[in-house]
Image: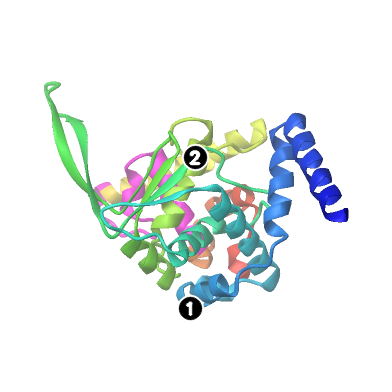
Amino acid sequence: MLLPLLLFAGSLLAVAGWLAGPPLWWAWRRARLTARPFPPAWRAVLRQRMPLYRRLPVPLQRQLQRHVQVFIASVPFIGCRGQVITDEVRVLIAAQAALLLLGRPAGRFRGLRQVLVYPGAFVVERPLTEAGGIVQDARRVLVGESWQQGQLIVSWDDVLAGAAVPDDGRNVVIHEFAHQLDQENGPANGAPFLGRRDGYRRWAATLGAAFDELRAQVARGEPSLIDPYGASDAGEFFAVVSELFFERPAELLRRHPALYVEFSTYYRCNPVDW
């Protein structure tokens, strides 16, 4: 008799949470998912494949595990071009994406609907407007892409490489999930939702100055800590610096302290302490 009553009570709580609105429903669902033990096999994947996970303080390791549990339970993974979706694929992508949420215990990628995984680099066709207004189809080889409609695409080869080398400032998962955060309030333009209106003025001034500096360095052919790809546009600049923030934080802090402070405030964490 006790078990049916408990199940009935749980159902009532679920319905009450849904009626109360998305935030309460999400909190209830997250609590249920994270109450389960983290699978030992998933922990083994993180220890073997993701050196950055091993460097995290234990409380952050546990928080990352909770994000992984929620992510895998909430977001479908789809294999493309013969890519098989295994627990290793899900865990390694979810864990690297979860780095961006470590300062947000109840965080999530609100617009994300599915993750598509290719075995390696993939080809896309995009219309290209040339001089004179002529539009032609152009083929591009990519290792990752984020769509505002909720799809995110990554190359499994590059997911593995990004996890294996945590200090080169290149990580396709961090890059594309930074775009997802940027796209939560519109197109990827380097201005994600900051929460407070007065924060946008400082954000725009700091990132704008660093972006202009990078573009000038690229034009002069000078080397820079920030990947030249970040000079493409403001959205790519945000994603590229996000890679540096999590993978080479000490160098970013030393060479671009104001930029580091803005990203530390936005992501609500301080990777130089990891």
Q: Which residue is mark 2?
A: 182
Q: Which residue is mark 1?
A: 48
23 relative to 206 in the view: left or right? right
Q: Position of residue 120 (x, y in %)?
A: 27, 59
Of 230 and 243, nearer the camera is 243
Q: Position of residue 213 (x, y in %)?
A: 39, 47
| Label disc, if present, on residue 203 of the rendered structure | none
Q: Nearer the viewer, mark 2 or mark 1?
A: 1
Quarter holding residue 146: top left
Q: Is residue 214 visible?
A: yes
- Residue at image point 39% right, 57% down: 172
2 relative to 36 in the view: left or right? right
Of 8 and 45, nearer the camera is 8
Q: Is residue 210 visible?
A: no
- Tell me if residue 49 comes above or below residue 84 in the rendering: below
Verify CB contact (< 8 Å) between mark 2 and mark 1.
no
Span of residues in magenta? 219-246
Three-letter code, disc 1: Gln
